[in-house]
Image (spheres, grey):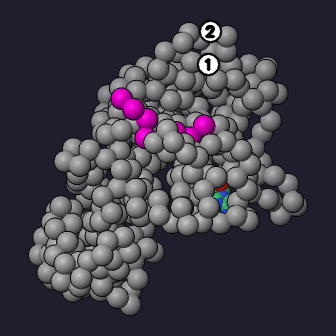
Amino acid sequence: MDSLLEARNLQVHFRGPNKEILKAAEGVSFEARKGETLGIVGESGCGKSVCCMSILKLLPSPPAIYAGGEMIFDGRFDILKLNKKSLQELRGGRIGMIFQEPMAALNPAYTIGQQMREAIQLHLPATKAEAREMSCDLLAKARVPDVSRVLDSYSFSLSGGMRQRVMIAMALSCQPDLLVADEPTTALDATIQSQIIDLISSIQEETGMSVILVTHDLSLVSETADSMLVMYAGFACESAPANEISEHPLHPYTKGLVESRPSSRVTASRLPVIPGSVPSLASKPPGCPFHPRCAYAKAICASQFPPETAYGNRKVSCWLYAGEGSS
Ligand SMILES: Nc1ncnc2c1ncn2[C@@H]1O[C@H](COP(=O)(O)OP(=O)(O)O)[C@@H](O)[C@H]1O
Ligand SMILES: [Mg+2]
């Protein structure tokens, strides 16, 4: 399967209050293949949104510094090197994005219909009536009931789940090759969460688009995603086909995440949790950022950043596996 988007060794920094460099993405690599779903998983603050925003170079710079790496789209160009005009064409053109809190992305002063029309007319020479018709189709695709009523509504009068469906419809308006969904269901309750995830996968089946689905909840993506990236404190712990991550996690952090999944809680006599919490960027320890919480940590883990080891189509960054890989 061909690669649609490939982040190679992405490095994104911020400046701390004392001008120190805060590494929010420390050499992160991932790949969204055509027609497939990549799940990005990790606890809050680990750099998932920084990576997503970097896909379209959306982080304002300053404060963000794109310090290194590449974001190769369609095997043809590096998004991080594009000028403003080309970036704008790509945004909402070939790449659509949806976020955790749709309320922030919708304008409360305009109806859903007005906002959808604007999004459509930005990319297509459509009349007002044509844009409304297209909006109806898009909302129907996002399984929005009572489409005309929703088009004439304001965002605040819709439920959270309905707002997220509207966002999905708007993101689809440009027929994107890639949909980036950054925690699209975190603000929603559990039943609506799975409906939205199911909706994204069924639209993906219809359109053949690629999806990057970000979540802090491993169980939410493990069944939907084809491949997964597990992040911790700005670095990529492990990437692999989704079923391998769930069935044979390699990195100690991934093992902790898998054991903490709700599905394994049912059989576990005691809930396994990873002790400690994610360090802030300013207090990131030297060596492997995970070593203070790792049950397998060795002396080297406290002083040197772990190298990446490849095992066929999997990659793991951990001293436990250094020097063992195959390719
Ligand atoms: N504008 C910013 N200035 C400074 N630090 C930031 C900024 N945006 C994000 N960060 C830091 O980058 C890290 C990763 O954040 P984020 O990508 O939002 O995490 P996640 O999406 O995984 O919850 C966090 O430590 C956060 O505080
Ligand atoms: Mg986030």
292 relative to 213, above or below:
above
The correct choice, above or below, for 128 with respect to 238 in the image is below
Q: Is residue 281 left or right of residue 80?
A: right
Query: In the picture, which quadrant includes the N terminus?
Result: top left
Mark 1, residue position: 309
Residue 274 falls left or right of residue 4: right
Task: Find the magenta span and give its range.
Answer: 1-8
Give the quarter of the image for residue 20: bottom right
Q: What kind of element bears circle 1?
A: strand
Note whether 145 is above or below 310 in the view shown: below
Q: Residue at x 27, y 56 (%)?
A: 196
Q: Which mark is residue 97?
A: none
Q: Residue at x 35, y 55 (%)?
A: 176
- 115 vs 308, left or right, is left
The x and y percentages for residue 210 are 35, 44
Residue 64 visible in the shown view: yes
> Residue reaching furthest left?
146
Task: Pick whichever, 127 or 269, lies toward us.
Answer: 127
Disc marking residue 324: 2
For the C terminus, which image quadrant? Answer: top right
Q: Are marks 1 and 2 in contact (CB under 8 Å)?
A: yes
Verify whether residue 5 appears in magenta: yes
